[in-house]
Image (tube, rainbow, N blue to C red):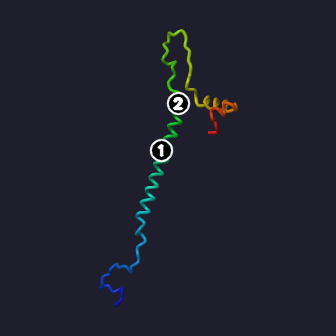
Amino acid sequence: MSTNDPARPEYLGSDSPVSEQSGTGRRGGRRAGVLVVGTVAVAAVAGAGAFGLVQLLSSGASPASAVPANAIGYVSLDLDPSAAQKIEAFKILRKFPGLKSELKLSSR
């Protein structure tokens, strides 16, 4: 009897070759899970970076806008300087060795 006999049905047994797709479902699922986790992590880092940048660059509304037009004088003290001023202040503080070691200022 030949194995290619059309009248005889084919049965899969232990001697039949295993298809190439068996066993890859779990690996493909792991790969998809890693891809999803990586995408979420990149999105979270990008969102946190964007939020930090907005907080650093935003100065908010000016208090001068709340002063009435008939006010005689106005004095302002800005406790939240612009980003450029913060960077310059950091550069100046790093020039003093005593402050650098006391405040633990590093290149970060």
Circle 2 packing at 10 Å, graded few (<14), some (14-19), many (20+), is few
Residue in the picture at 48% in, 17% down? 66
Residue in the picture at 55% in, 32% down? 57
Question: Considering depth in this image, is 96 or 4 the residue closer to the camera?
Answer: 96
The reply, left or right, for residue 77 in relation to residue 34 is: right
**Residue 90 at x, y = what percent?**
64, 32
Q: Distance between the residues labelled 1 and 2?
A: 21 Å
The reply, left or right, for residue 34 in relation to residue 93 is: left
Q: What element carries label 2?
A: loop
Q: Is mark 1 on a helix, strand or loop?
A: helix
Question: Considering depth in this image, is 103 or 69 the residue closer to the camera?
Answer: 103
Which residue position holds label 2? 58
Which circle marks residue 5 in the picture? Answer: none
The residue under label 2 is which amino acid type? Ser
Circle 1 packing at 10 Å, graded few (<14), some (14-19), many (20+), is few
Which circle marks residue 44 in the picture? Answer: 1
Report the quarter where the N terminus lies: bottom left
Report the quarter where the C terminus lies: top right
Residue in the picture at 61% in, 28% down? 85
The residue under label 1 is which amino acid type? Ala
The reply, left or right, for residue 13 in relation to residue 39 is: left
Residue in the picture at 48% in, 41% down? 47
